[in-house]
Image (tube, helix red, strand yellow):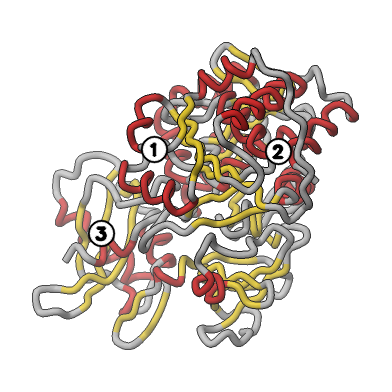
């Protein structure tokens, strides 16, 4: 099943052809227009070297050109390599070499980063497509590689995660339709961009497989711009990371979000305090979700069909979940452990990394490296990443509980707790705090937070120091780079 051909056929057969699929600025394209553009653009890509099994690196901002480049690549049976245009030149070069890209589609400003590789801008692709005849779709099976997304590199070099032609539809039928109720009359706006796993499902799979639409914003997702787009296009499903929601609540008017009936959070820790404020602001629930690049989109989620506040919900339909200890043995419900999942969109492996693939994939089970507790009813509570675990006095624990508690202090905007070595080489628990406003007396804030921790937590979980910082180190997806904080001592 060629995913691009299947989507075009679905639009025609289900009566979606004349429905709007994408909004970008003042421009809209229907489902039929998007697929016809992609068929012609496939001929352009083929003329520039793209072919079945070869890699086309896409480094564009969210746009109609991005969608057309992706669908055109899929139509040829080529492999779309989805990259953030904001990466460094070194990182772009690494990815292009790792995937053996034969063609790059990016803004002109990035062209010099890929010497010796054919290049097109998004504008050139659309312009040349207007003069081409549609290219036929290359027949491929469900397991044929469709795209590669590189992990965000929180602990080292990024790894290429390979996904199949069959996966796109499953993202929609699993999380989109059955859990969130995304349908033909819905409009998505995803703060997370198309080149991320979260954004690809939200802004491409959901609208194209439902007959609905998505708002594409090439620029940075500033709160005022998000509010403007939501109000103008009557967005029904809003997707963002917690830090984006915090900024929306601080800088915009709730009336602009009156059309939103479903708000989803993923990509980083959602505190109880933020969830409660966001629920009151949007006048609808804020659903927490857990996903990964390796799984393609969501692993577990809350939604219209099911909601347990304070958790990441239950596994997506079609997914199984097990909680295991460090040795790989299952642990009883109610005890923390590593989350292992098995499901139809779990990657078959990393690109050219068989040893790493074998380490995280065993008999179809993926070690997500998320720390969770599974309750007897199957609900999962997230407790951070395995890489985030701390050890104090020989006791290993997740700092998420501490962060959840301290984030309730009215002066705290963002917080991370980790162990940092002091001048003697001893590891001590430290809280890094981003305040809501400039702090006149850091010592008073430190005293307040330490007292709050002492009142509610075991002694070994009480931070020994509090450091006020301007921001926390995060990846482009919003994930905390805790290892950088550990090195700050």
Q: In the rendering, at what x and y percent does residue 112 appear?
A: 33, 32
In front of the other: 193 or 423: 193
Assign a secondary structure to mark 1. Answer: loop
Q: Which of 95 and 466 is in front in this view?
A: 95
Tell me if 441 is positioned left or right of 258 in this view: left
The Cα atoms of the two marked residues, 3 and 1, are separated by: 58 Å
Of labels 1 and 2, earlier in sequence is 1
Quick one: which residue is furthest to the left in this view?
Answer: 423
Residue plotted at (38% across, 56% down):
480
What residue sits right under mark 3 in the picture? 448
> Which residue is identified by label 2?
206
User: Which of the two discs, 2 and 3, sits closer to the camera?
Assistant: 2
- Whether residue 279 is visible: no
What label sits on residue 116 in the rendered view?
A: 1
Query: How much space separates mark 1 and mark 2, taking CA atoms?
Result: 36 Å
**In the depicted view, which residue is nearer to us: 479 or 397?**
479
- Depth check, mark 3 against mark 1: the one in front is 1
State the quadrant of the C terminus: bottom left
> Label 2: few (<14), some or many (≥20) within 10 Å?
many
Looking at the image, is mark 3 or mark 1 earlier in the sequence? 1
Residue 471: percent from left, percent from top: 27, 47
Q: How far apart are marks 2 and 3 (CA)?
A: 45 Å
């Amino acid at each position: 099943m060629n995913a691009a051909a299947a989507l075009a056929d679905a639009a025609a057969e289900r009566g979606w052809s004349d429905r709007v699929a994408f909004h970008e600025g003042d421009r809209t394209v229907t489902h039929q227009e998007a697929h016809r553009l992609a068929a012609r653009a496939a001929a352009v890509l083929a003329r520039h070297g793209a072919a079945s099994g070869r890699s086309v690196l896409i480094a564009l901002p969210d746009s109609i050109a991005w969608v057309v480049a992706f669908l055109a690549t899929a139509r040829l049976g080529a492999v779309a390599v989805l990259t953030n245009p904001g990466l460094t030149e070194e990182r772009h070069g690494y990815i292009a070499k790792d995937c053996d890209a034969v063609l790059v589609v990016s803004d002109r400003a990035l062209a010099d980063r890929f010497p010796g590789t054919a290049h097109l801008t998004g504008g050139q692709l659309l312009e040349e497509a207007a003069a081409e005849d549609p290219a036929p779709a290359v027949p491929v099976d469900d397991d044929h590689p469709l795209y590669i997304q590189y992990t965000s590199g929180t602990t080292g070099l990024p790894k290429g995660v390979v996904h199949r032609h069959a996966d796109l539809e499953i993202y929609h039928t699993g999380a989109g339709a059955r859990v969130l109720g995304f349908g033909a009359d819905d409009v998505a706006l995803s703060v997370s961009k198309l080149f991320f796993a979260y954004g690809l499902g939200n802004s491409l799979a959901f609208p194209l497989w439902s007959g609905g639409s998505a708002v594409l914003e090439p620029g940075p997702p500033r709160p005022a711009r998000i509010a403007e787009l939501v109000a103008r296009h009557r967005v029904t499903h809003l997707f963002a990371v917690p830090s984006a929601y915090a900024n929306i609540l601080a800088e915009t008017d709730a009336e602009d979000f009156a059309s939103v009936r479903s708000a989803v959070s993923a990509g980083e820790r959602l505190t109880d305090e933020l969830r409660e404020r966001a629920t009151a602001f949007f006048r609808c629930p804020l659903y927490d979700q857990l996903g990964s690049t390796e799984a393609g989109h969501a692993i577990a989620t809350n939604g219209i069909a099911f909601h347990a506040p304070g958790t990441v919900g239950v596994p997506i339909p079609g997914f199984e979940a097990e909680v295991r200890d460090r040795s790989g043995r299952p642990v009883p419900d109610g005890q923390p452990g590593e989350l292992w999942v098995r499901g139809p969109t779990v990657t078959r492996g990393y690109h050219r990394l068989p040893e790493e693939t074998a380490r995280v994939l065993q008999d179809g089970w993926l070690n997500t490296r998320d720390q969770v507790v599974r309750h007897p009813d199957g609900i999962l509570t997230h407790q951070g990443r395995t890489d985030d675990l701390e050890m104090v006095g020989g006791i290993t624990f997740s700092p998420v509980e501490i962060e959840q508690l301290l984030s309730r202090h009215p002066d705290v905007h963002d917080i991370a707790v980790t162990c940092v070595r002091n001048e003697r080489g001893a590891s001590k628990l430290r809280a890094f705090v981003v305040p809501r406003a400039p702090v006149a007396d850091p010592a008073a804030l430190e005293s307040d937070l330490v007292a709050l921790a002492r009142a509610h937590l075991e002694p070994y979980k009480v931070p020994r120091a509090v450091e006020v910082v301007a921001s926390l180190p995060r990846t482009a997806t919003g994930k905390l780079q805790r290892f950088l904080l550990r090195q700050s001592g």
